[in-house]
Image (cartoon, rainbow, N blue to C red):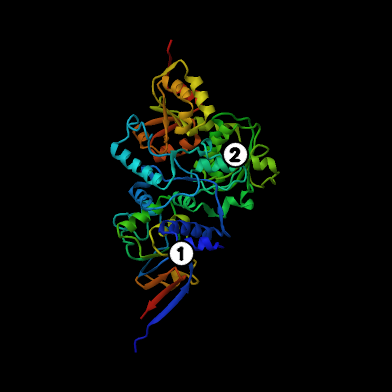
Amino acid sequence: MYLTPEEEKTLNGEYGESLQKAIEILVALGDIYGADKLIPVKSAQIAGVSYKTIGDAGLEWISDLEGKVKIPSILNPAGMDIVRWDEMGIDPVFAKKQQEIIEAYAKLGIQTKCTCTPYYLEGFNVTLDDHIAWSESSAVSYANSVIGARTNREGGPSALSAALVGKTANYGYHLDEMREPVVAVEVDCELSGSDLGALGYVVGKTVGSRVPIFYMKNEPSKNEMKALGAALAASGAVALYHIEGVTPEATRKTFTRPDEVIPVERTQIDEVYETNKDILSSEIITIGCPHCSVEELEEIAGLVEGKKLQKEMWVCTAREVAERHPDLVQKIEKSGAKVVCDTCMVVSPATNKYASITVNSGKALAYVPSMCKVAAKYASIEDCINEAGVVDEN
Amino acid sequence: MRQVLSMKIKCRTISRGVAEGEVLLTNDAISFLGNVDPETGEIVEAQHELYGQSIAGKVLVFPHGKGSTVGSYVIYQLFKNGVAPAAMINLESEPIVAVGAIISEVPLVDRLEKDPYEVLKNGDRVIVNSTEAFVELKKE
């Protein structure tokens, strides 16, 4: 791999050990994947934040690093709401370790906003063909597919290295040829709302880590595409998908229709809603995987207005989005639901104490049963709120 | 007359450094998260070929890593606990082990010019010099 004289100096340790380790990681990955050089990236999003995931080893490594990041950098969701962790029933020992992890990242100049939707935040708006180094699988999918930016699925240390160096190795989804679709998904019916998360859940397993192109009967919204991509990345390992005539790269050019076709029928989508249907009443309902957009918060606020929920319900979003819309947060919380920031039902140990959960996310449906050992049921946003057991206030 | 044979095998550098140790070979891939006890360096996965053996201080030869990316941090934990392998040799390295080796200063190489499963056996003393991209086998 070609390195500039400056990059060679960094690799030889002339700018300190932390930067040396960081560039060594980028070069090693570049060599493994056959990159020709390092390229500048506009922003980084770093995974490996929840104490539940990285443990003491991860905390030690981050704490041992020195220096400052060179590009806008933020974090993936943590294991708890940083402010209201006590209300979530988080163990104080866990909370202390979680705070230490976040402080260790802050010391490196990383913005300590913990979200899976960085694209909603100030300073992280990316556009078509921008190169970035993001970690969170659903954010990677959204950036690549819905925005048309370019990122690989970075691991925690490689995203952190990219943040410190301001560059990443030029391989994988940074290259045009790796962005061509290789498998077609033909959907034979119109889909809306949570159907898209179900679609991702259904086809992700078959698609695996390949690039699919969808041929749809109707055009999904950006929020629906967010749900589709998150589920594709969870049940499979999809980092980029196209939708014919909809996503930016599939509008800019006409891709050759791949020979391999995965047909999807309405009955397959309906089956997802039948998962664990013997659970008559879930103990908790969660919405916001990935974190809710403003439009989604508006929709939820509208649906719960004038109602009192009888069960625990979490609405997960980025703290910055919640702080920008205190009116919506207030409306939602008036119903008894909690607007939970910095975390979600998948990464927080607070989920583990429930026996059953209802979600409107294909990603949560794929992960919660194995990661939190909680039986999960799938429903539309309206049915999620019905499941929460509402009574009219009047 | 005692003859000391030494064989140098070229390879690709993944994590730079120099280390010497005894070879421990396995044909099984390793998921550092789950397969290895970070406190002791022992392989704790019952289905694994190296079950019950310690990788601490060894030149660990395995085809490649697998499993969760948290495995990188487990290698760091082994290093912090003083029970990391001295060096590692892969057929083909992947990111989890590569990143773990770099942050833990464990020399790691792959793509040896000769098949490591043919030229190396358990207990051989080798030097892994990944800074200069060779593995040296010492035989008396």
Q: Position of residue A165 (x, y in %)?
A: 49, 53
Residue nearest the observer in this picture, A38 or A222: A38
Res B88 quadrant in image = bottom left
Pick out the residue farthest to the bottom. Answer: B1
The answer to whether residue A223 is left or right of residue B127 is right
Name the residue carrying label 1. Answer: A12
- Is disc 2 placed on a helix, strand or loop? helix
Q: Nearer the viewer's eye, disc 1 or disc 2?
A: 1
Residue A380 visible in rendering? no
Q: Which mark is residue A210?
A: none
Compared with residue A21, is residue A285 higher up or lower down, i.e. above or below?
above
- Is disc 1 placed on a helix, strand or loop? loop
The C terminus of chain A, quarter of image: top left
Q: Position of residue A343 (x, y in %)?
A: 42, 36
Res A239 quadrant in image = top right
The residue located at (37%, 36%) in the rendering is: A80
Mark 2 is surrounded, within 10 Å at the Cα level, by few (under 14), some (14 to 19) or many (20 or more) other residues, namely many
Compared with residue A98, is residue B49 higher up or lower down, i.e. above or below?
below
Residue nearest the observer in this picture, B104 or A15: A15
The N terminus of chain A, quarter of image: bottom right
Compared with residue A97, is residue A288 higher up or lower down, i.e. above or below?
above
What is the C-alpha distance between the residues marked 1 and 2? 39 Å
Indicate the amino acid at tag 1.
Asn
Compared with residue B21, is residue A171 higher up or lower down, i.e. above or below?
above
